[in-house]
Image (cartoon, grey):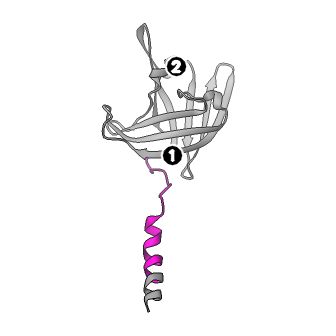
Amino acid sequence: MKKIFYIIAVIIFLPGCQEDNQPASEVVGEWQLIQSHHYVGTEVIREGEDLEWQEVYVFRSDGKFAKTRTTSSGNLNASGTYMVEDAPLYLSRPVKLLLKLTFTTGDGLAGGCSPGTEEFDLSSHDGMVRNYSIACQNPILTYQKK
């Protein structure tokens, strides 16, 4: 009788112990670059047609992403996987989620401080996604969901 009880308990409770690797639904979809904010001695903000390039991320529900950058010389593509984490409470920015990207192709398009990686914040304030790699002298890039 005890064996049956333990087997039933394991069947009932084990699925609740599995790690949830599904990305947050608000991340899944297509995100377009809308602003570049750079500090090069002076503050430079570019939007729309003034951007140096156009860029789109597509985050899929299976934890994979694709990135396309369009420049005057053509399209550049990259892809990889991403993870979504709750934002730590100590951040001074209004952040809801953190996205951590790992590139498997086109890692030259990765805008993070470490090769082949990139991190984004999903703002709890305006729902925009921002890349804050300013510590590496990269611009702050803001993306809006289409």
Tell me, yes or no, whether the highlighted magenta stretch contains residue 20: yes
Give the x, y percent position of residue 138: 50, 20
Instruction: Indicate whether 37 appears above or below 114.
Output: above
Residues in magenta? 8-27
Specify whether residue 36 is in view.
no
Q: Nearer the viewer, residue 141 or 99?
A: 99
Tell me, yes or no, whether the highlighted magenta stretch contains residue 57: no
Amino acid type indicated by mark 1:
Met
Q: Quadrant of residue 127?
A: top left
| Residue sitting at x 42%, y 73% | 13
Instruction: Indicate whether 41 appears above or below 144.
Output: above
Give the x, y percent position of residue 80: 62, 41
Q: Which residue is mark 1?
A: 83
Specify the farthest residue to the top: 41
| Residue sitting at x 60%, y 29% | 115
Count all numbered tags in the image, as a single digit.
2
Q: Nearer the viewer, residue 140 or 136?
A: 136
Give the x, y percent position of residue 125: 31, 36
User: Circle 1: is it few (<14), some (14-19), or many (20+) Cα within 10 Å?
Assistant: some
Q: Quadrant of residue 109?
A: top right
Which of marks 1 and 2 precedes in the sequence?
A: 2
Instruction: Indicate whether 44 appears above or below 123.
Output: above
Amino acid type indicated by mark 2:
Leu
User: Circle 2: is it few (<14), some (14-19), or many (20+) Cα within 10 Å?
Assistant: some
Mark drawn on residue 136: none
Q: Which residue is mark 2?
A: 51
